[in-house]
Image (cartoon, rainbow, N blue to C red):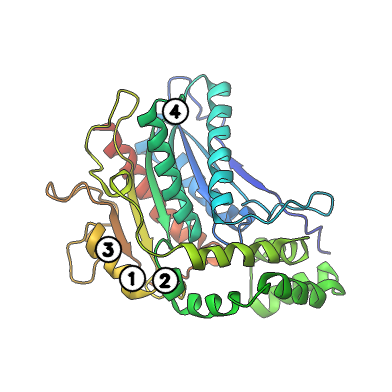
Amino acid sequence: MVETMETRTTVDYGPSTDRTRTDAQEYLIFLIPGNPGLIPYYDPFLSALHALLESSPALGSSNFHLCGHSLAGFEATEGNVPRLAGLQDQIKYVDDLLYNRVDEIRDRTGQTPKVILMGHSVGAYILLEIITRHRTRIESLISQDFDLIGGILLFPTITHIARSPSGIVASTLLSIPRAAHIASAIAKALVYFIPSSWLYWLIRIIMRFPDHAARTTVAFVKSPIGIKESLFLGKDEMDQITDDRWGKEIWGAATEPGTNSKDTINSNLVFFWGSHDAWVAKRTRNDLINARGFHDSPTLKRKSSSSLTDSPDEDWKPDMFIDDGRIPHGFCIKHSEVVAEKVQRWVEGIIDNHDII
């Protein structure tokens, strides 16, 4: 028997009771999902990462709070249907969620957590925009802030998404007037008469999704505006994710001193792309790596995926890696554990690098 397909809007993993120490440093690792922005897709990933960090000897004096929240519009229910949220709306929404979560941990522990952001797909674009806003607040001294010590961008779609193989198709279809409304209406009509339990098993069998992904997909297609929100946001992605638009607040010297006493260092950034990603054009990816990233081989891959600053001449550049396997863009469906293992090493590297500055 299949249980209800209602889905959560948040996923949280906190420090284990037997590990928590009052003198330990608090860390918030905050995940920004891709599109469709339903956080339950990432539950196995966050669970695996939490277990790895909790068991890491190198991080024994740290308390980790891992959390993520669905993007705006994807948490809609029949009794609560918000307006559609575009890309700029999502950036503000996630920014507010992040600050609220920092405040919650500060109030509960008496310590302001150091923050590491993670972003998947368009969540990586949102991540970079949040770092930009964070830097502006610090330089303007307009609010009490926190140390944002790093960002991990997984399968990032941060430039020219419309030039990717899937982007070419999506941008063409979404250029049709009212495409999001039409496609949403058709999809909802197709699944309206199919019971959720039947739809669950169709997804399990046809798409070969594991349990968590099948349940989340059913909740997505059955939600009041989930499909419409995904397409509406997708249109904004095609239109707005174009040229590299960031300056020194993102690409500047990651180990330079900050602009005031509230700041420590620019965030350490780690980028990880799939080798065959239909949502990322290889040429734009490689151009970005050549212009912005640390790389020391013709294949544009670092020798060690756990090292953050191997060369004094380029240690200010973000680490950028291309997967040497076949991890798909939607890693959170079936490849959570292998990505969690990579992220654990990068988290350790970010913390080590921050501590020695």
| Quarter of the figure with residue 149 | top left
Numbered-mark total: 4
Looking at the rendered image, the quarter that the N terminus falls into is bottom right
* Neighbours of disc 2 within 10 Å: few (<14), some (14-19), many (20+): many
Q: Secondary structure at mark 2?
A: loop
- Amino acid type at circle 1 is Thr
Look at the numbered discs 1 and 2 and tell me whether their residues touch, using CB distance below 8 Å: yes
Q: Is residue 15 visible?
A: no
Describe residue 265's horizontal placement relative to residue 65 as left or right: left
Residue bearing the label numbered 1: 284
Question: Percent from the top left, x then y, of residue 64?
Answer: 48, 36
Q: Which mark is residue 145?
A: 4
Q: As rendered, which of 50 and 331 lies closer to the eye? A: 331
Residue sitting at x 39%, y 36%: 136
Dividing the picture into quadrants, the one containing residue 86 is bottom right
Q: To which residue does mark 3 refer? A: 289
**Visible in this render: residue 279?**
yes
Q: What secondary structure is marked by label 4?
A: loop
Residue 194 placed where, x, y %?
Answer: 84, 74
Earlier-in-chain disc, 4 versus 3 = 4
Q: Of callouts 1 and 4, which one flags the residue occurring earlier in the amino acid sequence?
A: 4
